[in-house]
Amino acid sequence: MPDERAHYFVGSYADMHDLVEDLVVPDGVPEAAATVLRTARELLRQSYYCYEFSTVAVMHSLIAVEIVMRDRIPGAGKKPLQQLIKQGAETGVLTARQAEYLDYGRKIRNGMAHGKTTHAVMPPAMAVPMVTTSFTIVSDVLCHRSLTDCH
């Protein structure tokens, strides 16, 4: 059965396919990050049945960004995400806007992970652009250190 709130953003489950059709894992993404991105996409699709999945999709997509940043930022080691974001912005791996987005997402994620934010529900209309941004950042971070043109 669809979540009772699903009708606020789509008419039917088939419409969910259109909602996520542009969320394609870029070529060259490490498998660990690619799996996480695909899961985030499917969580968005399934938010038709469980509205809260859209929030989980956003949090999950941040994991993929962190995986790629750890791979691309020199000396990343076990630095917290906040430091990776700062270093990524300082070295040009991330744009200022990307760093701002990631820091915002990091704060939401931390609030949920540490029990400070509970029952957070992000409507799919908000979640899709945020997950799309994660897909884009993963692609951009991979291309930053690449010798080939990725776009």
Image: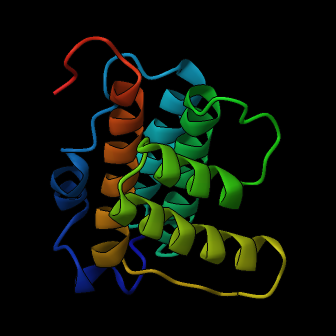
* Figure check: 49 above or below 61: below
Q: Give x and y (percent) for residue 45.
A: 36, 55
Q: Which residue is most to the top?
A: 147
Residue at 66% in and 69% down: 109
Seen in the image, is 26 located left or right of residue 40? left
Q: Quadrant of residue 6?
A: bottom left
Point 79% across, 34% down: residue: 77
Q: Position of residue 125 (x, y in %)?
A: 27, 76
Quadrant (top left/top right/bottom left/bottom right) for the N terminus: bottom left
Q: Position of residue 36 (x, y in %)?
A: 55, 38
Instruction: Identify the residue at image location x=39%, y=86%.
Output: 4
106 left or right of 43 in image: right
**Residue 26: quadrant of the picture:** top left
Spot the residue most to the front.
90
Q: Is residue 59 above or below residue 146?
A: below
Tell me which colouring the rendered structure shows: rainbow
Q: Is residue 12 left or right of residue 77?
A: left
Residue sitting nearer the eye, 61 or 88: 88
Q: Position of residue 21 (x, y in %)?
A: 19, 45
